[in-house]
Image (cartoon, helix red, strand yellow):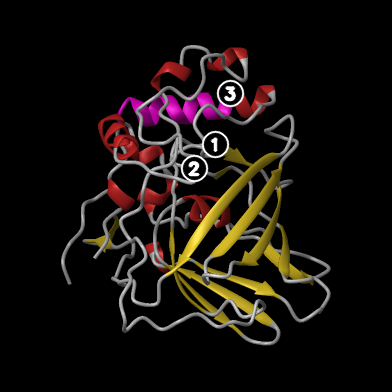
Amino acid sequence: MTAMPAMRRGIFSTTLLSVCALAASGPDNNAGHSVPALDKPPHPLLAPLIPQLTSGFYSPNGSPTTGDDQLPPSTDPHDFAGRYAPLEATHLLPGERGRMASYTDRGARVFMERAQERIDGHERVDPTTHCNPEGTVRALNQGSTVQVLQSATQLTLIHMTNHLVRRIAIGGQPGPSAMRPSSVGTSIGHWDGNTLVVETRGFQDDLWLDDYGDPGSEHMMLTERFTKQPNGSLRIEATLNDPVNYVGPIRMVRNWGWAPNARWIESVCMTEHGKTAGGKR
């Protein structure tokens, strides 16, 4: 296995952000430019930070592959099993150029501290450099391949980066009376016609929701609507509510292309000489 760089998923830096953005293409048709997130800050505290942020989607490396030997997707709209390649990724929520979250005072303060440290090159403030998991929301925004396993009672999402696993109950069983806080939360799904509606609660406090450090609290709730498209791709409409950090909901749309031939590589956080390192192998 070949050693990967020390930073996860492409080494976050302002230089790389510009490169990613310039190479971008996304469904909002506004990516492809290294541009500030907003002309006007969503909170007064963020005014000096905004010109340093890069927004917009960028194209992930694991684009869907095509060919005569590619396994066609199931025609069952309730069958999500298979391998997918995200069609867009972003370093900053919600992803579309010119949009940012609306912060509470607390959310703006935390985001300001985290983002400025990352921009200044202090990469190890990011919990993923210490082998902590990305969590549900951050995984939704990154561009690594996703393997979906499905049974009558559970949908399992395995993200290639760090092999993050989400388990979504879909069999109609009630949620647990007590939830142990975690980075992925506890997810319960139900069918609304051909759309799987998933509600996730029970997140741990002080999560990073993207590469700049948008915060998530233990009061956060994520609602996702997964809909299978005629070409086999998945459309995910997500709404994030966290009254501790944001004034209103954050709405996102992500698309995962059907990609049964997408390459799956070992991409895990390692330890070196007994110390935690942010490398992949």
Residue for badge 3:
109
First in sequence: mark 3 vs mark 2: 3
SS label for mark 1: loop
The x, y position of residue 112, in whole percent, is: 51, 24
* Residue 276 position by quadrant: bottom left
Residue type (three-letter) at the residue carrying disc 3? Arg
Residue for badge 2:
210
Query: Where residue 214 is drawn, which disc sits there?
Result: 1
- Mark 3 vs mark 1, foreground winner is 1
SS label for mark 2: loop
SS label for mark 3: helix
Q: Is residue 113 magenta?
A: yes
Residue type (three-letter) at the residue carrying disc 1? Asp
Q: Indicate the quadrant containing the C terminus: top left, top right, bottom left or bottom right.
A: bottom left
Residue situated in front as seen by the camera: 72 or 202 = 72
Mark 2 residue crowding within 10 angstroms, few (<14) / some (14–19) / many (20+): many
How far is disc 3 from disc 1 in space, using C-alphas? 10 Å
Proximity of marks 2 and 1: CB atoms separated by less than 8 Å = yes
Q: Is residue 93 left or right of residue 180?
A: left
The x, y position of residue 210, in whole percent, is: 49, 42
First in sequence: mark 3 vs mark 1: 3
- The answer to whether 50 is drawn above or below residue 219 in the figure is above
- The answer to whether 126 is drawn above or below residue 8 in the figure is above
Mark 3 residue crowding within 10 angstroms, few (<14) / some (14–19) / many (20+): some
| Residue stretch rendered in magenta on the structure | 110-121
